[in-house]
Amino acid sequence: MKTKLLTGMGLALALGACASVPQPNAALENARAAVQTAEADPNVTRYAPLDLDVARKDLNNADNAAMHHQDADVAQSAYLAMQNARLAQAHGAAKADDARVASGQVERDQIMLAARTRDANNANMAAANSRQVADAALSQRDQANQETARVQAELDALKATPTPRGMVLTLGDVLFDTGRAELKSGASRTLDQLTQFLTEHPDRRVQIDGFTDSVGTDSYNEELSQRRANAVREALISRGIDSSRIGTEGYGKSYPVADNNDSGGRQLNRRVEVVIGGDNGTPISPRTGG
Amino acid sequence: MLMGLSNRAKGASLCTAIALCVAGCATTPVPNEQLAVAKSSVQRAEASGAPELAPVEMSTARQELASAEKATADGMAQPARQWAEKANVDAQLAEATARERRSHKAAAEFDASMAALRQESQRSPQPAQ
């Protein structure tokens, strides 16, 4: 009797093990869904295929256990399949993020390199611009220097000498006949040079001052010196210089430049001085003092 | 004769039952090795920042490891093996989840820095005139 019972149990066990229709199992289906989700995750197939293999193997074990109605094993393997599927997804996501950062480093380095290159270029361009500005300033200064030098050369050609009132060109006694105010032809060259200078420098004014020696009355000398100054003025006007730029004054025997006691000194004192004003067009102050 | 056959059949069935039982017992030896693997995985997860970054998974793994140790102490080999397997996979999941969150945070910070860098590079001063 006891033997019969044991035999029945053995048959029951054998039948149970051989049954091929598994019962629906929620844990197993959840595990299957988790594995399928992992399979559909491109990060898993790319970065965690081995984890996915483990999950599939667990799921396979669970299916086999279910086929044999080994419920405890179904639950265990289904749990392992589910967790390994999640593990695969976690690994895949982590590695995908790491890979994105790694490839992004390259782009970041490129951007930073480009930025540095551009900054360097900008600095170079700024430096070039600064050089241009500096060059332009130098060039302007050079031009100004050249202009000054040219004016000086022109004034030198006129044999002008510097005084506090400006450059002074002296037309000597030899250009006038004694007691007369008409310019002799010898003055032409000097007056042509002066005219050219005044034409090239339209901002400059001239002051023409006449002087005599001490021979004769003051009124005569003043009148004569004025007429001689006027003669020079007329000569400049006839050469095209605007009359408004020309001032005249007769100083008579005042302001002698030499001793009136000898004929040589007197000759030096008989003169017309042409004062050339600055390039800002300011009027030339009248003669004062010694 | 009939009786003899019947006895032999009985004997065969009995053998089958015993064989099944033995086979079942053979797959569940005392799981020292699996327990050691589970312990090692839990320790690694704990060292990887999982307690802070994946506390739920970490806690699960610890409880499963404790259950595996208790079952082992009670001489319950099969449950001990199953708890150890669970503790192992959950410790790995805790570690992986921690890593996933770290990587995600790092990637988000990187994206932000890249966005700032791109914006700055587009807004950079034009070459001076």
Image: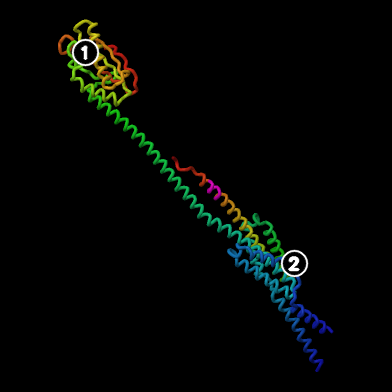
The count of marks equals 2
The answer to whether tags 1 and 2 share a subunit is: yes
- Residue located at (54% from left, 47% from top): B119
Figure check: B66 above or below A134 = below
Does A129 sit left or right of A189 as displayed?
right
- Label 1 to label 2: alpha-carbon separation: 137 Å
Query: In this view of the protein, which residue sits in the foreground, A226 or A44?
Result: A226
In this rendering, which labeled residue sits more in front, label 1 or label 2?
A: 1
Q: Secondary structure at mark 1?
A: loop
Mark 2 secondary-structure assignment:
helix
Specify the segment rendered in magenta.
B114-119
Magenta stretch contains residue A164 = no
Q: Which residue corresponds to mark 1? A: A181
Q: Considering only order in the chain, which callout, 2 or 1, is on the residue closer to the N terminus?
A: 2
Q: Are marks 1 and 2 in contact (CB under 8 Å)?
A: no
Q: Is residue A50 left or right of residue A134?
A: right
Is residue B116 located in the magenta-colored stretch of the structure?
yes
Please report, as a chain letter, where disc 2 is located. Answer: A
The colour scheme of the drawn protein is rainbow
Q: Which residue is mark 2?
A: A26
Q: Nearer the viewer, residue B20 or A18?
A: A18
> Badge 2: how crowded within 10 Å, few (<14), some, or many (20+)?
few
Q: Which amino acid does the dot numbered 1 rest on?
A: Ala
